[in-house]
Structure formats: C-alpha cells, structure tokens
C-alpha cells in the first residue's frame, strides 16, 4: 500500500521501461553527432532573473507556470521552464563566444518544469532534447536545425510530418507589426478575454495564439506578419524555404504561429504530426538573434528548438513502433545447495569479468523456482549446478529459446566460448 505518491504531473521511469528511453536517447545522440552537435548539461535551477530577461516577464510561462522559490540564502531560484536560457547563460558565462564559431550544442533528458493543469495530459516535469546553433545568422542554420528535428521524428518512424513556419520579424520591423496588431485588435477590445486585454497592452504578438474561441475567431482576420516584416527578414524567410525544398521537407506558412517566448526573432517553427485536422505539435523552436547579447554576451545570432521526450515516446507507443528489448541476462546460473551456490557465485563473478551478462540465485529458491524465474525474465541460457556437477566439474548449458543442451566444463572461459561462439 503506497503511502507516498509522486507529485502531480510527474512520472517515474520504471525499471522495465527505461530501455525505451535508452533507445530514444541513443538514436538522438547518433543523429546529433552526424551534425556535429556537442552535449551540454546545465543545472536544473537557475536564478529567476535569467528567465525574466530571456523568456520575458509578460509571457504565460513566467507569469503563471514557473516553479520559483526563495532559497535559504534569500535568492530567488527557478526550476528551468525551458532549455534555451540556461544554455545561453552557460555560453556567455564560459566565454564560449570566443571559441571557433558556430557553436553547436545540444541537451538531452533536460528536466523542464511548468506548473500546468495535469488533466490536459501535460506533465509538470518533463524532459527535453534541444539544440542551439549559435553564431550564424544564415538561413542554412535555421534549415539545419529543422532538419535535425525532422530526421529524429522520421527515424522514430513518424512518416506524416509537416513543418509550420512563420517569421515574427526583427527589432527593426516588429514595432510596425505590433502597431498593426494593436490597431486591429483595438477595434475588438471589448470582445477579447481578460488575459488578452492585458496582452493587448504588454505583448500584442501573443494575441494571436490565445486558445479562447472568441479570441481565436477575432485573430483569424488579424494582419499577417509576413506583410509587415522588413526586406532582410523576408529574404531570410525566402531563403529558408529554399533550403527546406532542397531537403524535401514539406512545410506550410502559418501566420498565426508566434510561440510563447519573447526571445524569438525572425524564424519561428513547429513540427506537427499528422495532416489536416488531427495535428499535434511535436516540437517548436526558432531564431533568437538578440538573446546572447541580452544575457551579457556579444551580439551573436542563434537558432534552436526543444522537443519533449515523453511526447516522442508516447507517439512511438501510439503508432505501435516497436523498440527492441535488450537482453538482460545471457546466462542464469542455478544451484541445488549451498556449496553449488558458492560455485555458481564464483562463476558468475568470473563471467562478469569477461563482460557477460549473468546472475545467480539470491533468493534461496528451489531449483524448480529458480528455473521458473529464469524463464520469466527471459534469460538466454541456464546452467544447473549440483553435487554431481561439482564432482564432474561440468554441467549442462541449456539454451532457453530452443531447449538445446550441451555439456560444458565449469570453467568461465569454456562457458563464455560456448555462449558467445
Ligand atoms: Zn525585420
Ligand atoms: Zn484571449
């Protein structure tokens, strides 16, 4: 009877399930390596100020969703609500901007915390994979980042993918667009939800992705960014689409796509699964050319994305994509009495030294029960050791898959040779 339960919105990875994570992690590492991205690991906690500066004080993430607390030294600390701010903080703090550029980094299994309503199927702690490509303002960098995300989902086995794309402009042209938005939404101010009334004042771009139906209806006819962005932003977007065509990645322009974080400039994108109606967002990202400077570094452009790993695993399960369960034990050594158990234990140790996955009885079970257990956990081979086996210094090695038996000396090298042959 469990007295304690994991906090709402968190999830354990159970012993018989962790291989699924390993499989996904391995696949992601292989892909990241092909593109030359190097792993970083940053702390789970950061100073709250970091997220106010980067994610933005008026965003939903900062205002409603962060896990923030005051530590014993009276500092305001926050559990990471996303991966990019910590990565860029690391980049600036360690002077990585003075190394050879571009900088290509990724984080894997990065815990991310958002105080969200768990009934929406969302976790309050989930894990992200993300990449940041820093130092290049070229559209090929945006394209490469999108290519990695796409390749991951394709490798997982998701065939019907689409990239949703938009440009939210740069500091030079965004003001012009925000004015146009304010002019448009100003006419509908009374009809907007309460949150949007505030957004209208503080963050008009966010008016475009309100989930309230009445707001959505109004947003439909709002002016599009693409009609307001400057020539440079437009050229960047055109070039990116060219690269996507070269890679054969299908995309659609979505003028409603703005993403909920303030640091984005120019490109924003989401990768969605499924075509038409039942689309689900798999990952999102974009360009953030001002963030390195904002966090105290030099002016350096950057682009990246983050993807939820639980989400990817869930999708694999829903699509019936099989993950091979790794073999846990090549050999289970069974013993009939105490002295044969000692021998089994000794062999076990020697075989592990040789690199074999092997175990012996730790439960004091009967041979019959040991055999049942070996069968249940799908050991590849078993070997029963009793008094007569000790006398003859040999025992029968049984292949559990086909029942074949062979007499083998109680010698680690011989056993190893027979199983690995
Ligand atoms: Zn611009
Ligand atoms: Zn609204």
Image (tube, rainbow, N blue to C red):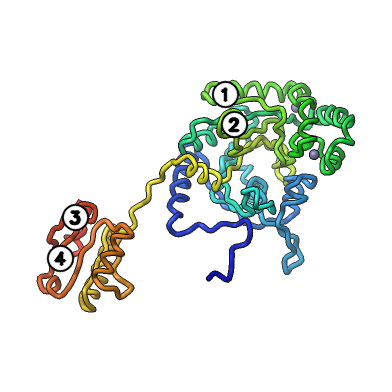
Is residue 392 visible to the viewer in this orientation of the structure? yes
User: Where's residue 408, x and y in %?
Assistant: 14, 61
Q: CA distance from mark 2 to mark 3?
A: 56 Å
Q: Which marked residue is nearer to the observer: mark 2 or mark 1? A: 1
Q: Is residue 349 visible?
A: no
Identify the residue position indicated by label 4 in the image.
Answer: 395
- Front disc: 1 or 3: 3
Q: Earlier in the sequence, mark 1 or mark 3?
A: 1
Q: Is residue 99 above or below residue 249?
A: below
Q: Residues within 10 Å of mark 4 (few under 14, many from 20)?
A: many
Q: Residue at x 16, y 60 (%)?
A: 414
| Residue closest to the eye, 357 or 221 | 221
Residue beneath label 1, please? 243
Where residue 1 appears, as percent x and y from the top left, is 53, 71
Q: Residue at x 15, y 57 (%)?
A: 405
Depth check: 200 or 320 in front? 320
Residue that appears at 32% across and 60% down: 376
Distance from disc 1 to disc 3, alpha carbons, whole Å, reads 56 Å
The residue tagged 3 is 403
Residue 141: numbered disc? 2
* Residue projecting furthest to the bottom: 338
Mark in front: 2 vs 3: 3
Q: Nearer the viewer, mark 4 or mark 3?
A: 3
């Amino acid at each position: 009877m469990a007295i304690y339960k994991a906090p709402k919105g968190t999830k354990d990875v159970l012993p018989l399930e962790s291989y699924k994570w390993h499989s996904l992690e391995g696949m992601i590492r292989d892909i990241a390596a092909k593109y030359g991205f190097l792993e970083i690991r940053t702390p789970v906690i950061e100073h709250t100020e970091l997220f106010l500066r980067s994610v933005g004080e008026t965003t939903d993430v900062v205002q409603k969703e962060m896990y923030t607390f005051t530590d014993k030294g009276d500092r305001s600390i926050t559990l990471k609500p996303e991966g990019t701010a910590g990565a860029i903080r690391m980049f600036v703090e360690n002077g990585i901007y003075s190394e050879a550029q571009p900088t290509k980094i990724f984080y894997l299994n990065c815990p991310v915390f958002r105080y969200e309503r768990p009934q929406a199927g969302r976790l309050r702690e989930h894990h992200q994979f993300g990449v940041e490509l820093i130092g290049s303002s070229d559209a090929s960098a945006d394209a490469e980042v999108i290519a990695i995300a796409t390749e991951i989902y394709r490798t997982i086995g998701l065939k019907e993918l689409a990239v949703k794309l938009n440009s939210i402009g740069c500091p030079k042209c965004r003001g012009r667009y925000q004015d146009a938005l304010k002019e448009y939404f100003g006419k509908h101010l009374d009809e907007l939800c309460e949150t949007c009334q505030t957004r209208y004042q503080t963050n008009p771009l966010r008016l475009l992705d309100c989930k309230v139906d009445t707001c959505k209806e109004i947003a439909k006819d709002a002016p599009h960014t693409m009609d307001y962005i400057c020539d440079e932003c437009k050229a960047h977007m055109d070039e990116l689409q060219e690269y996507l065509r070269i890679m054969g990645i299908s995309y659609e322009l979505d003028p409603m796509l703005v993403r909920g974080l303030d640091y984005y400039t120019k490109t924003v994108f989401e990768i969605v699964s499924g075509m038409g109606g039942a689309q689900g967002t798999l990952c999102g990202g974009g360009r953030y050319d001002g963030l390195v400077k904002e966090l105290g570094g030099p002016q350096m452009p950057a682009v990246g994305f983050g993807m939820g790993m639980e989400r990817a695993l869930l999708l694999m399960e829903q699509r019936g994509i099989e993950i091979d369960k790794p073999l846990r034990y090549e050999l289970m050594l069974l013993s009939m009495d105490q002295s044969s158990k000692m021998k089994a234990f000794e062999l076990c140790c020697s075989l592990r030294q040789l690199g074999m996955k092997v175990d012996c009885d730790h439960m004091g079970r009967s041979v019959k029960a040991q055999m049942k257990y070996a069968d249940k956990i799908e050991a590849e081979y078993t070997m029963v050791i009793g008094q007569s086996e000790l006398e003859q210094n040999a025992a029968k090695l049984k292949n559990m898959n086909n029942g074949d038996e062979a007499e083998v000396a109680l010698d680690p090298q011989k056993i190893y040779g027979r199983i690995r042959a």
